[in-house]
Image: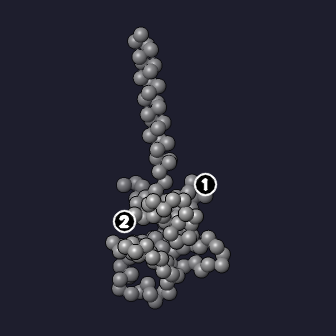
Amino acid sequence: MKDAFQIVTVCLTLCLVALGCSCEMRDPNIKVSHDYYLEKFPENGKFYMRRAGEGDVPGGVFDGIVLEVGWSDTVVLAKIKRLYGGDEDGVYRLDLSSGQVIGPLPDETLQFEKYSSISMEEVSTVWNRMKSK
């Protein structure tokens, strides 16, 4: 009877470990601000910005792949590679309170004081730093 108990205990422990590992693999998201989060697709390793509760919108809120990102309490700035080749790549602004996306922004707009304090970094650098927290 003691051996059966040990076998069950080992099996349950292995199941819990496996479940814990798979949960990490199934949560490819990092909260950015408000309802918005970065999602990394395991199939292609690309990053997209999504809004909680909006389902599986292709390309996310920017309709494209996030290459660089930075944010404040009010806006997210992101360098985007648009999904449709006819759309213009560039830096886009997401207003966190309204959900409105504007862009691509000209370089001179990014020099304004309200944006100059937002440091954009390569998205994989941001991802790795936030995942390690």
**Mark 2 lies on residue:** 34
Residue with the most extreme left position: 73
Report the side of 42 relative to 31 (left or right): right
Quadrant that contains the N terminus: top left
Q: Residue at x 47, y 38 (%)?
A: 19
Relative vertical location of residue 119 with respect to residue 123 in this rendering, above or below: below
Q: Label 2 neighbourhood size at 10 Å, few (<14), some (14-19), many (20+)?
A: few
Disc 2, SS? loop
Q: Residue at x 42, y 55 (%)?
A: 131
**Would you say residue 35 is visible in this rendering?**
yes
**Mark 1 lies on residue:** 43
Report the side of 98 relative to 48 (left or right): left
Front residue of this view, candidates 39 and 99: 99
Disc 1, SS? loop
Callout 1 amino acid: Glu
Residue with the most extreme top position: 1
Q: Are marks 2 and 1 in contact (CB under 8 Å)?
A: no
Q: Residue at x 54, y 59 (%)?
A: 56
Q: Residue at x 46, y 44 (%)?
A: 23
Quadrant position of residue 44: bottom right
